Image (spheres, helix red, strand yellow):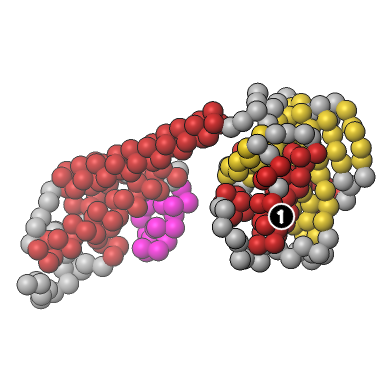
């Protein structure tokens, strides 16, 4: 049965009216909690609740803001337990609860990072000798796109790069699918028997991995990609984040901006990670 409050005084301290600013800032128990968590710096007088919260989030680091939110949540949860369940915890116990929850969050984040790194390592070790990274840049106003293709050997060294302009492109997804098709065609032109095609469009990569007929708006392009699989002994498609596809992304954007297609061989990386052409085969 819920407790009915006869007055609006704080159940913890009984000193004054219980509004949100009192619960999270003024209550002596709350002040002790913030002190235990090394958050004494958040006390800034002559503020209302909204101004105080805005100030804290503007002053704190990302980690401090995250921990501060955990503290707010726990303080409110314990306030409700006292009100509705008559269960009271000391400020030190509440502080411990908050610290435990923060450690649990950090542990979960570390597990995600470790699992992501392990997955990328496994994916890298499974890749074949030849790989083509692809990306697209899209111009909505002019319905144009550019494909950026970067060819790498098993050591990850860039050995060729190609960019192509396309007209009458309906959407970014179409642009990505066209770039994937260009990658499959380039592998055949280079005489590859095995190839890994790698891009940062999860939708396009997933459709290329499937063997069933795609009925979406880019289904015809996906069908063209699927039809080229028979010309390889083995072809595989991998998704990577945009941050790991910078060369193809930069090539596509530069081509769309400047309007000049190109095909380069003997690429290497500069000290800044940019592509440097050793030998220009053709420029269109």
Viewer-proximal residue among 242 and 198 = 198
How many numbered dots are placed on residues in this image? 1
User: Quick check: 262 left or right of 239?
Assistant: right
Quadrant containing the C terminus in the rendered view: top right
* Residue 195 image point, x, y percent: 66, 36
* Residue 47 image point, x, y percent: 38, 60
Viewer-proximal residue among 241 and 28 = 241
Q: Is residue 82 magenta?
A: no
Q: Which residue is drawn at 88% across and 28% down?
A: 279
Q: Residue at x 57, y 49 (%)?
A: 209
**Residue span colored magenta:** 42-59
Q: Is residue 247 visible?
A: no
Q: Name the residue under label 1.
A: 224
Q: Can residue 57 be seen in this view?
A: yes
Viewer-proximal residue among 209 and 260 = 209
In terms of image quadrants, where is residue 248? top right
User: Quick check: 99 left or right of 281?
Assistant: left
Q: Which residue is drawn at 10% across and 75% down?
A: 4
């Amino acid at each position: 049965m819920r407790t009915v409050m006869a007055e609006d005084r704080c159940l913890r301290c009984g000193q004054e009216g219980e509004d949100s600013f009192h619960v999270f800032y003024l209550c002596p128990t709350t002040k002790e909690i913030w002190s235990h968590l090394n958050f004494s710096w958040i006390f800034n007088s002559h503020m209302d609740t909204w101004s105080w919260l805005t100030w804290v989030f503007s002053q704190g680091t990302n980690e401090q803001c995250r921990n501060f939110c955990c503290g707010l949540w726990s303080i409110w949860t314990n306030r409700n337990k006292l009100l509705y369940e008559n269960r009271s915890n000391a400020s030190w116990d509440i502080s411990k609860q908050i610290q435990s929850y923060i450690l649990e969050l950090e542990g979960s984040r570390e597990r995600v990072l470790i699992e992501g790194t392990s997955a990328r390592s496994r994916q890298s070790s499974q890749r074949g000798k030849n790989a083509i990274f692809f990306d697209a840049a899209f111009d909505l106003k002019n319905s144009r796109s550019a494909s950026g293709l970067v060819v790498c050997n098993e050591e990850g060294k860039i050995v060729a790069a190609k960019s192509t302009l396309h007209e009458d492109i309906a959407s970014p997804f179409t642009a990505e699918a066209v770039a994937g098709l260009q990658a499959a065609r380039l592998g055949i032109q280079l005489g590859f028997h095995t190839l890994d095609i790698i891009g940062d469009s999860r939708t396009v990569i997933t459709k290329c991995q499937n063997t069933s007929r795609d009925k979406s708006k880019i289904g015809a392009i996906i069908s063209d990609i699927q039809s080229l699989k028979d010309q390889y002994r083995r072809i595989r498609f991998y998704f990577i984040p945009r941050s790991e596809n910078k060369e193809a992304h930069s090539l596509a954007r530069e081509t769309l901006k400047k309007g000049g297609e190109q095909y380069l061989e003997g690429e290497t990386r500069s000290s800044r990670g940019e592509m440097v052409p050793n030998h220009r085969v053709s420029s269109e």
